[in-house]
Amino acid sequence: MTLTCVGIGPGGGDDMTLRARTALEAAELIVGYTTYVKLVQKDFPHKEYLATGMRGEVERCRMALERAAEGKRVAVICSGDPGIYGMAGLLLELAPEYPGVEVEVIPGVTAANGGAAILGAPLMHDWCSISLSDLMTPWEVIERRLTAAAQADFCIALYNPSSRGRQDYLQRACDVLLKARSPKTVCGCVRNVGREGEERRVLTLEELRDAQADMLTCVFVGNSQTCVVNGRMVTPRGYRLGDS
Ligand code: SAH
């Protein structure tokens, strides 16, 4: 039996690819974090759902694999892309314990490119993503990656910039970045990409240091060339415009 691990994009609905939609149509049981279940339930009201809370990732994946092993057509949904801080890796790691279950990963639009389009074109040049969540990654490792990305002048998409338990992480991350980057570096925040209450803000790195960002925000730090054009955040690709 094939279990699909489906990226529903940042907001579900219109953000979903046709392939994701087809996979959910084919599924009998849809498994996911409660918020994501709500995002797809309106489009697929007649499916069986299994919604679980935030921290139960391993149990959620095991339940899904067990049901697939019993012969059910199961889809595990993730926001954005399942292979970017999603469930695809964990499902593939656990799958060998469930002989006969194949995992198919169905990609989705991740928060970084969904949010980038709203801000303008901040990721036009080399970029990397860094998650500020230290639930599974020691803070020293996160800090080392921030330093390396800042020194190499990457544009950076920051995922998991804050949560109730760690409100000063964005500030700490900015302090690390400011050691190698100008305080005037153009940055952006996008909240609720593709969902109700979508908001964007363009600001400098020193302003970002004192900004509020929650778990529903994706933060963008430009490179040394990133600029603001008519209110939009743009990282030049390098085309020469002066002599055209
Ligand atoms: N698999 C997801 C990422 C999960 S990690 C993806 O590919 O997008 C969760 C983090 O992703 C959040 O803390 C936030 O930084 C970002 N994120 C996810 N959905 C978002 C949305 N709709 N708007 C803004 N940021 C989002």
Image: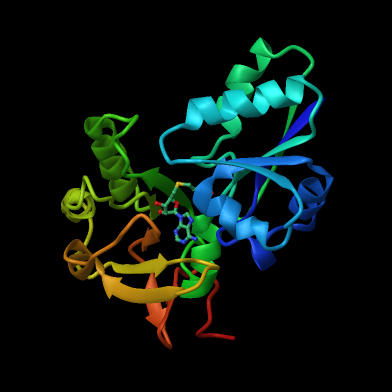
Residue 234, x across and y down, in percent: 45, 73
Residue 62 occupies quadrant: top right
Query: Looking at the image, which is closer to me, 60 or 211?
Result: 60
Q: Quadrant of residue 30?
A: top right
In the image, 69: left or right of 26? Answer: left
Residue in front for this viewpoint, 72 or 18: 72
Task: Classify residue 207 as left or right of residue 41.
Answer: left
Number of numbered labels in the structure image: 0
Q: Where residue 22 appears, x then y in whole percent?
A: 82, 51
Q: Image point 66% across, 44% down: which residue?
A: 49
From the viewer's perspective, is 42 left or right of 170?
right
Q: Going 54% across and 70% down the picture, which residue do you hit? A: 117
Q: Is residue 237 visible?
A: no
In the image shown, does 163 or 108 lie closer to the viewer? 163
Give the residue drawn at x 23%, y 34%.
Answer: 139
Is residue 99 shown above or below 143? above
Visible residue check, residue 17: yes
Which quarter of the figure is the N terminus placed in?
top right
Give percent across and percent down for residue 91: 61, 26
Q: Quadrant of the C terminus?
A: bottom right
In this rendering, would 150 be left or right of 178?
right
Task: Decide: is 36 above or below 139.
Answer: below
Q: Quadrant of residue 48?
A: top right
Whether 26 is drawn above or below 121: the answer is: above
Q: Position of residue 56 (x, y in %)?
A: 45, 32
What residue is drawn where x is 49% and y is 65%? 115
